[in-house]
Amino acid sequence: MTSRKQVEVQYEQFTFSGTGEIYSFTTLQETPEGFDDQAPYTLALVKLDEGPMITAQLTDIDEPVAIGDRVEMVTRRLTSEGDRGMIVYGYKFRKTLSRSS
Amino acid sequence: MRDLAIIGIGQIPVGEHWTSGLRTLAAEAIYLALEDAGIEQVDALYVGNAYGSSYSSQTQLGALIADHAGLANIEAFTVEAAEASGGAAIRTAYLAVASGAIETALVLGVEKSTDTLASARVEARSVSLDADYEAAHGATLTAMAAMLMRRYMHEYNLDLNAFEGFSINAHANGNRNQNAMFKNLIKPGRFASAPMISEPINLFDNAPDADGAAAIVITSLDRAVDMVPMPVRLTASAVATDTLALADRSDPLYLKASNISAHKAFAKAGVTKDAVDLFELHDAFTILTALTLEAITFANRGEGWKLAQPSVIGLNGSLPISTFGGLKARGNPGGATGVYQAVEACLQLRGQAGSNQVPNAKVALIQNLGGLGSTAVSHILQI
């Protein structure tokens, strides 16, 4: 009799600081379904301070965005399934706010 | 492994076929390829299709199309690798026929995209991105390509005009191709001012979604020489992959899969990159053209855009590309694209390219990409 080999995938928890800088970005005029009401919106590749890169929308934009800008993660609505459907929340990034000490 | 040859080719015009459905387009291309090969039956049909499940609400294209084309009961199934589906289907046929398991195989690339509304089509195409880490954030393939392009322009201090020559070349060649979707010429100086789709990618940069179907017949070289006057040898086939999400690449401006698959193909065919007489590449965006030319080392890093001039990429240049218009002007029928590339390379090698003819073409490289090089399929064809 053979027993099924047990394989355990080990994930290590890692907490990111949530800060990084803009590697690149674009503003979409043509958007997929579910995102139409947000168009035009800006998407970015964000290089996190710990090294990895992540794809996310930029939010709270009130001045021009540039490559190299410092950004920080915030939680926002990504999309929703109509008036009565589920609201999907996730991460977006905004320009790092200057904080007075 | 047996040596292989392409003995039949068929294509229908790329464009908006409002009065034909997926199965009709498919059957037309199949009939043309079978007629060209002078045969009526094959042993297997491999279908390259990327978006049939969403565009046409249809899977099991193998059974559907084999039956509709009068090839009922043969081995038939779909091969999917996003926009590299056509190339991957050729790869499947290559393995099947080279191994001897299949004697003669038909490869069909087909996409029917115009039955879907624009926003639904953008959504449908986003299934080839990383669903959790890209598409869920509202990303599209064009947006991801746009971010690559902006970074490239930033790194090498370029403006949009640097890429203009690629689209001018594609449209100049599409202008002479009766099967091309776009036959209009792009006037020098007009590229940079075209309407933006996803900045910096604009209308003159982005290859158009289209309907299309193309087919080739592959058999062993031994059989081929007795069947047709000009068998085109299929001397190499190679696939490589890269991360699905662009953000996961340590160097996003380097198309590693493009490099690996092309160089595996060169090694298999026993040719160097300098032997390539024409290169049908995956010019869905001009940035992909520049990065592909760099990845395969036709250009140094950061200098792929410098090849965007007639003396290099034109029909009489040192490395003709997009010789029938490429994805940009011939059009981008999704999973059919890779098979169109093969058909066009065969026309060049057979000397049947008409006013698109590259003089003295003996060696053709074709490369079909899925996404932004997550899948790269390279084939080498020789006469």
Image (cartoon, coloured by chain):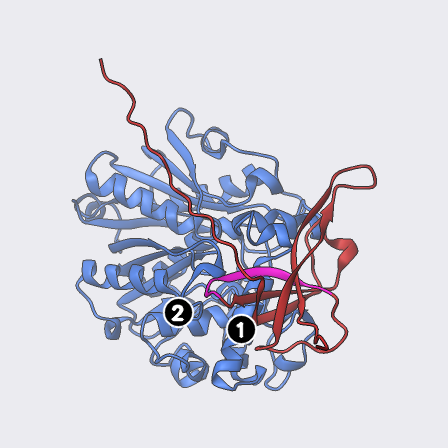
Near-viewer residue (A48 or B101):
A48
SS label for mark 2: loop
State the red chain: A
Magenta span includes A56: yes
Residue B170 place in picture, x, y as percent: 51, 72
Q: Is residue B316 left or right of residue B99?
A: right
Q: Is residue B346 above or below residue A65?
A: above
Q: Residue at x 43, y 44 (%)?
A: B108
Magenta span includes A7: no
Q: Residue at x 67, y 76 (%)?
A: A65
Q: Residue at x 29, y 73 (%)?
A: B360
Q: Colour of chain B?
A: blue
Q: Amino acid at mark 1?
A: Met
Tell me the number on the disc at residue B149.
1
Q: Amino acid at mark 2?
A: Tyr
Residue B369 place in picture, x, y as percent: 43, 58
Q: Please provide the residue range marked out in magenta.
A: A50-59
Q: Is residue B241 left or right of residue A76?
A: left
Q: Which residue bears the numbered disc 2?
A: B254
Give the class, few, some or many, for how many residues have Cα within 10 Å of label 2's Cα (few <14, many ≥20): some
Residue A49 place in picture, x, y as percent: 51, 68
Near-viewer residue (B266 or A100):
A100
Q: Is residue B217 above or below residue A58?
A: above
Quarter of the image holding residue B248? bottom left
SS label for mark 1: helix
Q: Is residue B2 above or below residue B246?
A: above
Picture quarter with the C terminus of chain A: bottom right
